Amino acid sequence: MVTFDVGAKFTMSEASLSVTALPAFADNYIWLVDNRTCAIVVDPGDFATVDTALRQRALTLSAIVLTHRHEDHIGGVKKLVSQFSVPVYGPQSDEMPFVSHPVSEKAPLVIASLPVSFTVLSVPGHTREHLAYYAPDQQWLFCGDMLFGAGCGRMFEGTAGMMIASLAQFSALPDETRVFSAHEYTLSNLKFAQEIEPNNQDIRQRIEVETAKREKKQPTLPSTIGLEKKTNPFLRHAEETVINRLLALNKIDSKDNVSAFAAMREWKNVYR
């Protein structure tokens, strides 16, 4: 279990909110948010990982929050609900019948027991129903598989235009916003980012910083929106350096932002 110093703290009755990364499977992070008494989990793909963390910390599970329906994000939900009988917040989907409280971007999501309030963002592209949760008071973003460290999710059910619009919602958040992605993909994504912008000093510096973390078996997450805007090629798809590089590599044949994004995503799908 890896605990982060997440910077901003929300204090109520001398109990601060904290965020803990619970490593699961090969590279997943399940995010646990707690106030030392109650907790919520975001995308609990594995029951045992969450159950162990709750018992070790003597926490009461108050709610489950889901971003999308892929098994590595929802696999532990049914058993958690049977054991803890808590509300499940997430997208309305026939493939997630256990979502007891469907949410949308039309209304905030308030977890009173912590307390914490999320702005719900509809961000289709990786899947059609994908949601993200932004806590404005803490400046925390739980983005599932839409935004990674220096990368983004595959377009399983979306188009390049859809992904661009969804990711633009993240770019519009304050630069200080902490980004809690669901996978430890940062170093491989940075390798690709350097392929796109070989002269980007921010990418070069980030590679050094993140490599040092992984050598110490530390997570590279959370990152920040400000850092992603400097180093993530999918948030930088309209930059001249990115466009010109793709033209030089014959990945695109015109200075079109959407084509640039699509070409990068297709290239990343096969990049090693």
Image: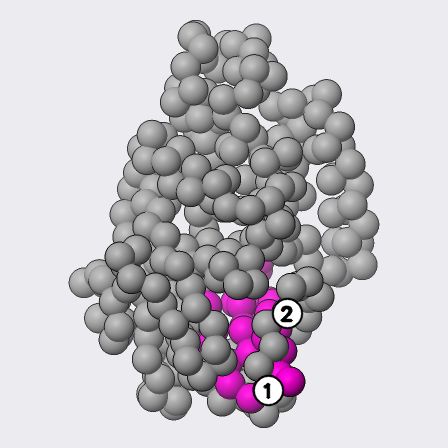
The answer to whether one can see residue 270 in this image is no
Q: Amino acid at mark 2?
A: Lys
User: What's the residue at 75%, 60% (across, down)?
Assistant: 217
**Rendering coords of residue 59 (x, y %):** 55, 88
* Boundaries of the magenta span: 13-42
**Mark carried by residue 9:** 2
* Alpha-carbon span between mark 2 and mark 1: 13 Å
Magenta span: chief secondary structure:
strand
Q: Is residue 46 above or below residue 199?
A: below
The answer to whether one can see residue 227 in this image is yes
Q: Which is more toward the observer, 91 or 215?
A: 91
Q: Quadrant of the N terminus?
A: bottom right
Q: In the structure shown, which secondary structural element does the residue marked by tag 1 occupy?
A: loop
On whether residue 21 falls in the magenta region, the answer is: yes
**Rendering coords of residue 237 (x, y %):** 50, 25
Q: Amino acid at mark 1?
A: Ser
User: What's the residue at 22%, 61% (across, down)?
Assistant: 93
Q: How busy is the neighbourhood of tag 1: few (under 14 within 10 Å), some, or many (20 plus)?
A: few
Q: Is residue 69 above or below residue 151?
A: below
Q: In the image, is 134 to the left or to the right of 13?
A: left
**Rendering coords of residue 26 (x, y %):** 57, 60
Q: Which is more toward the observer, 134 or 100?
A: 134
**Mark carried by residue 240:** none
Instruction: Look at mark 1 in the image and give the residue it sits on.
Output: 13
Q: Quadrant of the C terminus?
A: top right
